[in-house]
Image: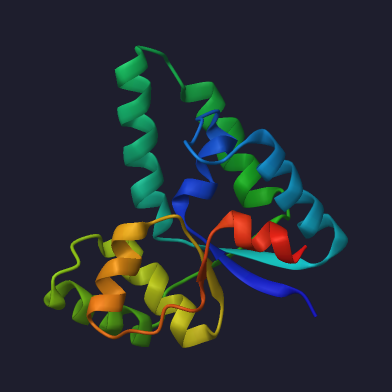
Amino acid sequence: MADRILLDSTYLLPTFGMEVEGISDEDLKGMRELLLRGDVEFFCLSTTWIELIGKICREAERRGIDIAERFREAVKSLMDGGYYRWIEPSAEDILMAFNLRRLGHRDIIDNLLYATSINRGIKLLTMDRELKEFLRRHNFKIDQLIDHSILLERG
């Protein structure tokens, strides 16, 4: 049975031509091979678009480039390519994310991703050390949070 993996937006940025520190082309190739072999199933949370649009626009402005055409192609690939299953947060996920915010974790998208991973029994692929530390300090379960190096070791 394939590992079910929920992706943090960091892992979607390369689709838009954005390099991510700590993720190499070889890492991306390895993740794709796991997917094509059926070893993993990748999920994306619909609310991740809020974060993606902001990050991509900021980076394009910083570089002084027009990314509109690349953005259109990347969206089509992500939505229609068949590699990712897009899911919506449930009421339970939203309530848990709210509680995480009330405890002090300000990144709402990360809170939703974490809540969704917990409530659905899906591993969360993230490199976010701040999130892990926050969850650890507040005695939340973190063993389902992994990064790509752990995922690739298993493959």
Q: Give coordinates of residue 26: x percent, y percent.
A: 71, 38
Task: Quadrant for residue 59, please give it.
Answer: top left
Q: Give coordinates of residue 77: x percent, y percent.
A: 65, 42
Which residue, as the protein is rendered here, is positioned at the far top?
Answer: 64
Residue name at image x 80 percent, y 80 percent: 1
16 lies left or right of 35: left
78 lies left or right of 155: left
Residue name at image x 37 percent, y 40 percent: 53
Residue name at image x 36 percent, y 15 percent: 63
Q: Give coordinates of residue 37: x percent, y percent.
A: 87, 60
40 lies left or right of 47: right
Residue name at image x 26 percent, y 63 percent: 108
Q: How is the image coloured?
A: rainbow
Which residue, as the protein is rendered here, is positioned at the far right?
Answer: 37
- The answer to whether residue 78 is above or below residue 142 is above
Q: Give coordinates of residue 127: x percent, y percent.
A: 45, 55
Of the 4 image quadrants, the one containing the C terminus is: bottom right
Count of marks placed on residues: 0
- Return the residue nearer the eye: 28 or 149: 149
- The answer to whether residue 135 is above or below residue 119 is above
- The answer to whether residue 70 is above or below residue 47 is above
Task: Quadrant for residue 154, please give it.
Answer: bottom right
